[in-house]
Amino acid sequence: MTAYLNELGLVCALGNNRQDVARKLFAGDSAGMVCESGWIPGHSLPVGSVDLDLPVIPEQLSAHSRNNQLLLAAAQQIEDPIRAAMARYGAGRVGVILGTSTSGIDEASRSMGSWLRDKSFPEHYDYRQQELGAPASFLAQWLGLSGPAYVISTACTSSARALLSARRALDMGLCDAVLCGGVDSLCKLTLNGFHALEAVSAQRCNPFSRNRDGINIGEAAVLFLMTRQASQSHSIALLGAGASSDAHHISAPEPSGRGARESMQRALDKAGLQAGQISYLNLHGTATQHNDAMESLAVHALFPDGVPCSSTKPLSGHTLGAAGALEAAFCWLSLAQDNTDSALPPHVWDGQADPQLPVLHWTTANSRLSRATPRYLMSNSFAFGGNNISLIIGDAP
């Protein structure tokens, strides 16, 4: 059964709607990555923050957090098609499946600080705003949905898994439409955690370079409307998804790339495709020493003849629980272009290849996706604990 990705709402460091995001994405514009202080004591670091007056959460809804504000901003962009799906299928047949890693933990941390200082919580503190399930519950409540609504939290694969789970919900007949994607907001807990791991770069991240020295953190909200029927304007679909769990280490990836290779191969098998049919690969590409090394080995093993590829994290930052859906959205934006030969996200780096890594085929601002042949795009997401997901989206037959 085909799972069509009919609508897309998103906000991230690249822009506040899909038109702005596409324009900057294909230009390789990293201006949204700005240095900010206050996240980590004594440091000013590049972060991918959303520059937007976020919508106010209605007072009657319980989960007041920046995470839910970002999600609401994305949902409002596609509210009309969502309401149309509710009218067509019924509120109980539309599901919400999201990924996150932060939820409302930043607000919870500040509230806990108030408790430690004053022995009382702030007036508007609500425990439910920090629960990992809060984004799905919030969105279902805001829309008045009564179908399945839940959150997946598997670190940096969370929202990629949400898309996989949404397709399963359609295949099993649990839903007729699913709002799926992910959301994560900047917060001190995650930034200080990655800093403690010595994984954060003080410059714009530099994936696959010999000079790479760590990640930049970002925030984003991404929301797809997935159904069994194609849109009237396009037939972009989730064609395959592959998952693996190599469980090599709590934070370090399996060095040979075995689990990453397995997830990519399983996605190809699910889609009924060969590696040579993939037109573009969005790499996980965090710009850390170990991740880039293992991913380059995995990609080279699966694509011995090469595949156009790039990491988009220098443009958006690593948006953690939202990253899988965001980078699938970048692939969606390539497919959704009206021109004959569509642009691809360029690989933004210093151009200094690591001689210890296999040579990969980097996209540039001039790279194009031809409509002359079927278009299949892959996106990788890898997480702590050896949790790996690869997605393939493209034009459904």
Image (cartoon, rainbow, N blue to C red):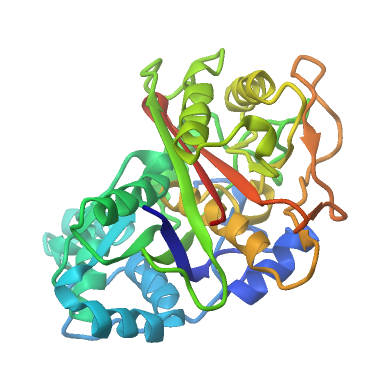
Residue 38 visible to an observer of this rendering: no
Where is residue 319 drawn, in percent x and y?
50, 51
Foreground residue among 80 and 215:
80
Query: Relative to residue 178, is residue 101 depicted above or below?
Result: above
Q: Looking at the image, which residue is at 66% across and 49% down?
A: 312
Q: Looking at the image, which residue is at 61% across and 71% down?
A: 15
For this orientation, the residue located farthest to the front is: 397
Q: How many marks?
A: 0
* In the displayed structure image, the side of residue 124 where residue 100 appears, left or right: right
Where is residue 12 drawn, in percent x and y?
55, 64
* In the displayed structure image, the side of residue 274 where residue 126 appears, left or right: left
* In the displayed structure image, the side of residue 221 where residue 380 appears, left or right: right
Where is residue 95 drawn, in percent x and y?
24, 64
For the C terminus, give its image quadrant.
Answer: bottom right
Foreground residue among 346 and 83:
83
Q: Looking at the image, which residue is at 49% across and 21% down?
A: 253
Query: Relative to residue 254, is residue 135 depicted above or below?
Result: below
Residue 12 visible to an observer of this rendering: yes
Where is residue 90 drawn, in percent x and y?
18, 79
Q: Looking at the image, which residue is at 74% across and 18% down?
A: 357
